[in-house]
Amino acid sequence: MSYCKQEGKDRIIFVTKEDHEAPSNAELVEDDPNDPYEDHGLILPSGEINWNCPCLGGMASGPCGQQFKEAFSCFHYSTEEVKGSECIEHFRGMQECMQKYPELYPQEDENESGPSGGDDTAPAEPSNTDAASVPDSSVDEVTVAGTENAATS
Amino acid sequence: VSCQLVPVHLWNVVELNDHTSFKRSHLICCVDESVKCVISVVINVDAKKFVGILLTMSPVEPALPEVPEHAPYLLIGGGTASFAAARSIRARDPGARVLIVTDEADLPYMRPPLSKELWFSDDPSVTETLRFKQWNGKERSIYFQPPSFYVSPRELQTVENGGVAVLMDRKVTHMDVRGSKVKLSDGTEISYDKCLIATGGVPRNLQVIERAGEEVKKRTTLFRKIEDFRALEKVSRELKSITIIGGGFLGSELACALGRRSADLGLEVVQMFPEKGNMGKVLPEYLSNWTTEKVKKEGVTVLTDAVVKNVSYKDGKVQIRMKDGRVVKTDHVVAAVGLEPNVELARSAGLEVDSDFGGYRVNAELQARANIWVAGDAACFYDIKLGRRRVEHHDHAVVSGRLAGENMTGADKPYWHQSMFWSDLGPDVGYEAIGIVDSNLPTVGVFTKATAKDTPRAVTELSGTGIRSESETEAVAGAVAGAVAGAAGAPAPPPQQKEDYGKGVIFYLRDKVVVGIVLWNVFNRMPIARKIIKDGEEHADLNEVAKLFNIHDD
C-alpha cells in the first residue's frame, strides 16, 4: 500500500513492489526514427556507419583511424557470401598499424584490463545504443565486427 | 633519407637557379644522414615543373617550428570537452589536423576520479601513476589516451593522415577573430580555420580567505587539477586536520573520500557550508538531510548553517570563525565553493559573456560567432528543451564537446541529447541525475526499499566502469518492460517511520512539467529518464511515471 507525505513543496511517496505491479498508464511520446537531432547508434538511418558513435571509442579517431575506417567500411558494405572476405588486405593494413601502437591497441591476450585509456565495448551487432558520451579508450571489442571471418589471421 | 615538404618562408636558401618561380615553389628537403647534407629539389607546384636542385652542406635539418603556424582545427583548452571535440572531429573529417592548446602540463584527463576513485586506491604510487582500480578490479588511467595517441605539434601540419597534437604549458592570451588567429603568452601566433573555446574555469575562493594573508592562503587548496589532488593527498598524510568549505558535489565527495581515510590516518575531517544539509542546492530537504547523516557516517564532522566570517592564522592553526560565533581550528582548508568560468578571451575576441550564468554565450548549436564554438564548463548555451543554461558536469563536457566537434565539421545540430551527472557517497549510496536538478523546484519522490544490488559498487561491477555515463553505452537501451508478474500481497509493510530512502526516483517540476530527475540508488535507467524530459509532457500522476523505471526489478 503506498503511503504519501508532503514536506512543504516536496511530495514523498513510498511504494512497495505490489504497488508498482500494474502497468503504468503514463504516456510517452512516440519517437520519430527520422529525427535529425537524435544521436544514433553505430549505423545511421541512411545505412552509413556513424564513425562518431561513442561505442567505437577512439577507433576511428586514433592514429590507425584511417585504416580502421577502410577495413570496417569494406566489411560493412560487403555483399560476399562470407561477409568481408574481400577485405583481408584492409584488415591486414589495420593490424599492421595497430601493432605499431601497442599501448593503444593491446593484443587480445594481454587485454585483461584494456588500454590505459578506457573500457568501451562496441556492440557486436549494430544497435541503437543510447549514445551517451565517452571520449576515451581506443580498443577493443570492435574487432568483433571486423574480424569474425578471421580476416586478420 | 627522410623528406619533408617545407613552405617557402622556412627555407634556408643558399642558391637558387630560377629566382622567378621562387614564390610559387615548394622545397622538398631531404636529409641524407650518411652524407650529412641537405639535398633540396625545388619544384614549381603550379606548373608542376622541376626548377632546380639546391645543395647545402650545412648539416641542418629543415627546422619545423615547435608550434605550427596554422591549425585547421584549433581547440583552446585541454580538458574533457576539448578532447571529446578532437575525437569527434577526427571521426568525421578523415585526416583532420587538430591542435589542442592547454596551459596545463598534462595531456587531457578526466576529473571525476580526482575527487573519488583515486582516493580509494590502495596503491601508494597512485599520485604518480594516476591509475585506479575500480570495484571490479579493472584498472584504468585518468588520462583519456596515452602519449602515443597524439602527434607532436611540430609534425601536425605534415604527418600523413593528420592527428591530434597537444601543445602544453601554453596559454592563449589574445584572439583576433578578424584575422582568424590567436596569440600565445610568448607572442607566437597560430591561425585557424575552426576554433573551439573549451577553457573551463577556475575554482572560486572565499573573499575572506583572499583577504586573510599569505599564511592562510598557503594552507588553502582550491581543488581542480591533478596538482591539487597530489598536494591534498600529501596534506592528508602529513597533517592532522582538514576543513572543507562547501557543501556541493566537490566538497561532499572530498569530505567522504577524506573521511574514509580519517581513521587510518588519524585525520580530523570537517565540512562546513551555509545550507542546511549536504547537496542542499540540489536535493530536496529530506534527502539532503539524509545525505548529511550519511556523510557523517563516513567520518566527517559536518557543520551546517555555517557562514564563514573570517579566517586567520594563529598559534600554528588556521582559525575559521563563523557568523554565529562557532570557531574551527584546522591545519588545512579546501575551498570548494564553485567555479568561475574562464572568459578571458571575451574581450579580445569580441565574444558575448552571459550575465546570468557566466560563461560565453552561445546558441543551441554551441556557436559563439562564425567559426568559433564553445563547449564544456565555459559555455552558456541555449537548451531547446530546458532553456538557456550552463552546466558544469563531466558528461556535459563530453556531450557538448562531441557536439561542437560535429558542428565544426559541418553538422549544424543543436544540443539535444541531455547529459547526465552522478555522485557517490561512498560505495553504498549513489545517485544519477539529469536535467535541471534544483532544490528550489517542487519535487515528487517515489521510494522503495533497497536491496544489496542497489549500490554504486554493484553497478560498477556489472558494467566494468566507475564513470557512470559510460555504463549507459554498455547497457542496451531497451523498451520499457511491462508489468512484473508477482504474487499478490502479503500485507504491506507499515509506512516508514524512520525515513529509509533506500532507492527511488525524484522528479523536479517546473510549471507541472518534469525538467529534472534524480535516480536514487537506481541504476541503468537513465534512458527512460532522458526520454521523459525530452517529451516535456505534463503527467497527472507521477507515481505512474515512476512505474516506468521498474525500480523493483533487480
Image (cartoon, rainbow, N blue to C red):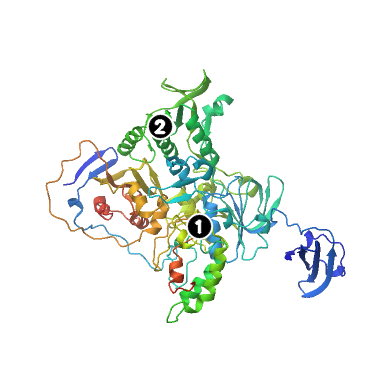
User: Which of these two is toward me, A70 or B406?
Assistant: A70
x then y, percent, for residue B151: 62, 57
- Picture disc at residue B402: 1
Q: Amino acid at mark 1?
A: Arg
Above or below for B196 versus B427: below
Q: What's the distance in space between the residues labelled 1 and 2, CA to CA?
A: 42 Å
Q: Read off the residue under disc 2.
A: B264
Residue A53 in picture, x, y percent from top left:
46, 63
Q: Earlier in the sequence, mark 1 or mark 2?
A: 2
Q: Position of residue B2 (x, y in %)?
A: 72, 65
> Disc 2 is attached to a residue of which chain?
B
Instruction: Give me the chain letter of mark 1.
Output: B
Q: Are marks 1 and 2 in contact (CB under 8 Å)?
A: no
Task: Tell me what residue is drawn at x 73 percent, y 64 percent.
Answer: B4
Q: How many marks?
A: 2
Q: Which quarter of the image is occupied by the N terminus of chain B?
A: bottom right
Q: Is residue B180 visible?
A: no
Which three-letter amino acid code belongs to the residue tagged 2?
Answer: Asp
Residue B426 badge? none
